[in-house]
Amino acid sequence: MTAFTDRFSRAVDYARIAHAAQCRKGSNIPYLYHLLGVASLVIEFGGNEDQAIAGLLHDTIEDGGAAHAATIRAQFGDAVADIVKDCTDGTAEGKASHTDAEAKRRDWIERKLAYLAHLKTAPDQTLLVSACDKLHNARAIVQDLEDPEVGPRVFDRFTGGRAGTLGYYHSLAEIFVAREVRVAKVVDATVGWMHELAGAEARMALGSVVD
């Protein structure tokens, strides 16, 4: 059994402060909900304390800025910092530099394709955290698709739109299955249900969708 120390408690507090002003897309739910959810999945599927802490902190650089990288390394160690870096596909500053919709879309596609390529060779300790993050997100999308008051309009929240989002999650599931990540079967089943609810006739990789 993995023993958890005060490092985990400090990471919860770090995440709470770093994301204090943020909510989940399309809701008033504090963003901390997602981070705690990812950490819980990491623990459920056998992750250690470093991986669980990385689950709490995986979005700090992307949503809060590059300055978090050095602070996380100093406070939580190299193993956590390396996983957080591996789970980051861009910085808050980088995303903010794109102002018009088409530029944001191009940047989104480039970042997601690069992240998918990176996952194919990423360390196993990173893959579990990444897969738990994507599973938690996929479940949220499925929940909204099942809600008659939201349904397919959930994809309006995402830069990639319906086709891009579905393609991205299909590509993620393929990689997690190929790399035999412990949670891969659950991710794949959830992504499959997402496609069915979205009325997608076939599951296509992100590269096929954007070409």
Image (spheres, rainbow, N blue to C red):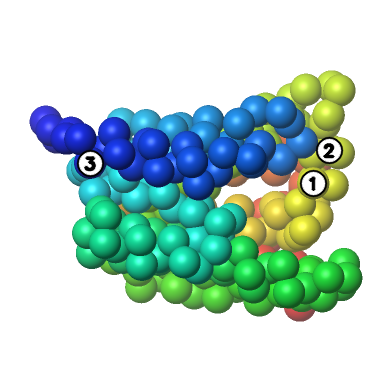
Where is 6 relative to 54, above or below? above
Element assignment for label 3: helix
Residue at x 41%, y 70% (from the top left corner): 120
Instruction: Identify the disc placed on residue 157.
Output: 1
* Kind of residue at badge 1: Arg
Which of the image's four quarters has the C terminus?
bottom right
The amino acid marked with disc number 2 is Pro
Residue 164, quarter of picture: bottom right
Which residue is depicted at the point 78% across and 22% down?
A: 147
Q: Residue at x 79, y 69 (%)?
A: 105
Residue identified by numbered label 2: 152
Q: Is mark 1 on a helix, strand or loop?
A: helix
Front of the two marks 3 and 2: 3
Q: Name the residue under label 3.
A: 7
State the image coordinates of residue 91 (x, y, percent, origin top left).
57, 67
Residue that lies at the very extreme toward the top in this rendered image: 148
Q: Are marks 1 and 2 in contact (CB under 8 Å)?
A: no
Q: How crowded is mark 3: few (under 14 residues within 10 Å), some or many (20 or more)?
A: some
Q: Please tell me which residue lies in front, 153 or 72.
A: 72
Is residue 152 rendered to the left or right of residue 97? right
Q: What element carries label 2?
A: helix
Sort mark 2 into few (<14), some (14-19) or many (20+) by Cα contacts within 10 Å.
Answer: some
- Please give the label number shown on residue 42: none
Q: How crowded is mark 1: few (under 14 residues within 10 Å), some or many (20 or more)?
A: few
Q: Which of 211 and 159 is in front in this view?
A: 159
Q: Distance between the residues labelled 3 and 2?
A: 40 Å
Query: Mark 2 or mark 1, which is nearer the start of the sequence?
Result: 2
